[in-house]
Image (cartoon, rainbow, N blue to C red):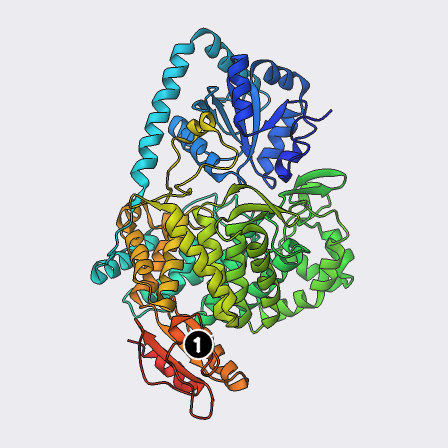
Amino acid sequence: MTNRLAGQASAYLRQHAENPVHWQPFGDDAFAEAARRDVPVFVSIGYAACHWCHVMAHESFEDPAAAEQLNAGFVCVKVDREERPDVDSVYMAACQAMTGQGGWPLSVFTLPDGRAFYAGTYFPPAPHPGQPSFRQVLHAVSEAWQERRDAVERQAGALAEALGGLFSDQLLGIAADGEHDGAALASAVGDAVAALARTEDRSHGGFGAAPKFPPSPVLEFLVRHAAATAPTAEDAQGLAGRTLAAMCRSALFDVLGGGFARYSVTADWSLPHYEKMLYDNAQLLRVLAHWVRLGGSDEFPADEAREAASLTADWMVRELGLAGGGFASSLDADSERNGRRVEGGYYVWTRRELAEAVGDADDAGRLAALFGLPLGEHASSAAPLHAGRALTVEEHGRLARHRDALNAARQLRTPPSRDEKVVAGWNGLAVAALADAAWALGRPELLGPAGAAATLLRDAHWDGERLLRVSHGGVAAGIEGLLADYAGCAEGALALYAATGDEEWYAWAEDLLGVASRRFIADGLLSDSAADGPAADDAPGVRAALAGSRSLDPHDAEAPSGASLLAGAMLSHAAYSGAAAHRAVAESILGGLPRLLREGPRSAGWLLAVAQALLAGPAEVAIVGRAGEDRRRLHAEALASPAPGTVVAVGGPGAPSRVPLLADRPAAPDGGPLAYVCLDFACRLPVGTPGELRQELATRP
């Protein structure tokens, strides 16, 4: 028996197609049915790689008795949070308002018009101390619905009003003259470094206590600040280096195949939560590439970062790359081990498994000791491979000798399942990461998958006026992209243009930003959803669940917010084009930085990175001349600069260009290449050698 999820494109929804629960997708039909039956709606939100979502599904949604209770008393709706982050954000805010916490699976009970009145996360099948069982919750909600309906509706109304006010308060005003106070901005950026230093875990690296998440947007800011001429630059370099070193030497990083797990359950990064997400790895690959470009530090040398970045780039292309271009969203936390699906089963090793793969008994013993594998061959003795420290030259050589054999042995196992959904904004981040890594790592072949992903996004997700958020099998469908999708794709396209000089990507970024300006800024206010139309499948009754059609969350979470991504892309485009309106948008968004910093710099990492680029100018480099090795060397030198936010344009001598930065920049008299370093389109005298360009960038205004 299947429910109404069997034909859905979402891998997460299809995971529940065989449940005895009468699931249906989020949409007006479900809420209309609830009104017709006069029952509440149970909205269950998760994503395909979520371990605890799988646990609750097995314990409760596959249980016939629980399913019978759900089907009798509720209309049951499944939501993939990665396809519908707009729905997830509203219901997560409701859960946090009611309980003080959130997470996935997210379990929400709503009126037939979509307004929430009760919410929680994971509910166990049997009661725990201080926590009811799922079936007890269902009974209590049904009883309240039948016997205290007025109180339930008052609760829903009050909560919806409070959330509407919260979301309205977060809308950002966009001024036509978004000027900034440079001294105040520099002071705020320095204060953010100091605040981050106060929350650093000096014992284990990173910030705060367990669980430990990769602070990816913050790391991008710290690496940029480390390249700046600021009193706190050295502090930022130390914070970034210690955090990157801790993560890359820990179980969070897959030392065999590359890539980072979603987070660590422990403060010392020793026990990962094994799901692997595109958005994490795209951001961390880019940060590592920028760290290499910066030159590393004694605490985390550039060569070590280069290896971690290269392994991660290979993992992303190999494990998440799709045949038609683009990147899948994630790999599951769970995988089969000894006939059972367990968390991390694909990644952990016992001593015997290690010895069988390595072959050499002495090397196997030394590697087992290095990685701290427990004695014994019980399932609990399996552990991830990590040293928790830098490897010696001898240890690194031993691991390198056996990496291929260990990977080959692991590939005989059943791999974790892959969610092949292509999310536009996350793929934009992946394009940017691969484009930057191609030059920083000296691996131009990475531009191939970057270009293929950008082509899929432009050809399948974009129709010239509208960007769809997700595609499956090369076919885009579902809701229009959110602000983070438009801005993430523009960020990727601009990075790909800088890396290749192919103006089709500059043109697409310009088109995306032009549409974003018209669609996401209305009445002088910026919002996460397009202002001139609802999500594709939401009729008015369902939109009530979304606390109104316009809202903005400016906080960085697992990925940069749409607002901070837009600020960065607008600033870069303005540096290429001289577009005062786009620079004003970026500066207006940066005007919200003080409020975010009062809540803590970890919620504003990407916006801080944009602020650092604005403080640096950013520098503009135009390279003009005939194609060839001399131009390639100048191009490489420009892209090697760690100066925050630097934009790079490349063109032929006298060739017409859509990029204003290249206009009226002559090549050498013989057509040879020259490089111009500019600020606000005011350029210094051109130079013709990499050494001269390096000097110009080092002494930029």
* Three-letter code for the amino acid on which mark 1 is drawn: Ala
The location of residue 212, given as percent across then percent down, is: 47, 47
In the image, 333 versus 379, the foreground residue is 333
Residue 485's spot in the image, x, y percent? 48, 49
Q: What residue is at 38 percent from the left and 49 percent from the top?
A: 518
Q: Is residue 87 left or right of residue 69?
A: left
Where, by quadrant of the figure, is residue 355 drawn?
Answer: bottom right
Q: How many marks?
A: 1
Which residue appears at 50% of the width and 53% of the height? 464
Residue lying at 65% horizontally and 51% vertically, measured from the top left: 373
Q: Would you call the spot at circle 1 few (<14 residues within 10 Å), some (14-19), or many (20 or more)?
A: many
Quarter that holds the N terminus = top right
* Residue 685 % position (x, y): 33, 85
- The kind of secondary structure element at disc 1 is helix
One can see residue 640 in this view: no
Residue behind mark 1 = 638
615 to 38, vertically: above or below? below
The answer to whether one can see residue 625 in this image is yes
Rendered-image quadrant of the C terminus: bottom left
276 lies above or below 627? above
Q: Residue furthest bottom?
A: 670
Q: Is residue 427 left or right of residue 202?
A: right
In the image, taking residue 77 as reference, residue 527 lies left or right, namely left
Q: Position of residue 90 (x, y in %)?
A: 43, 33
Q: Is 398 located above or below residue 179 in the figure?
A: below
Which residue is nearer to you in this view: 371 or 82?
82
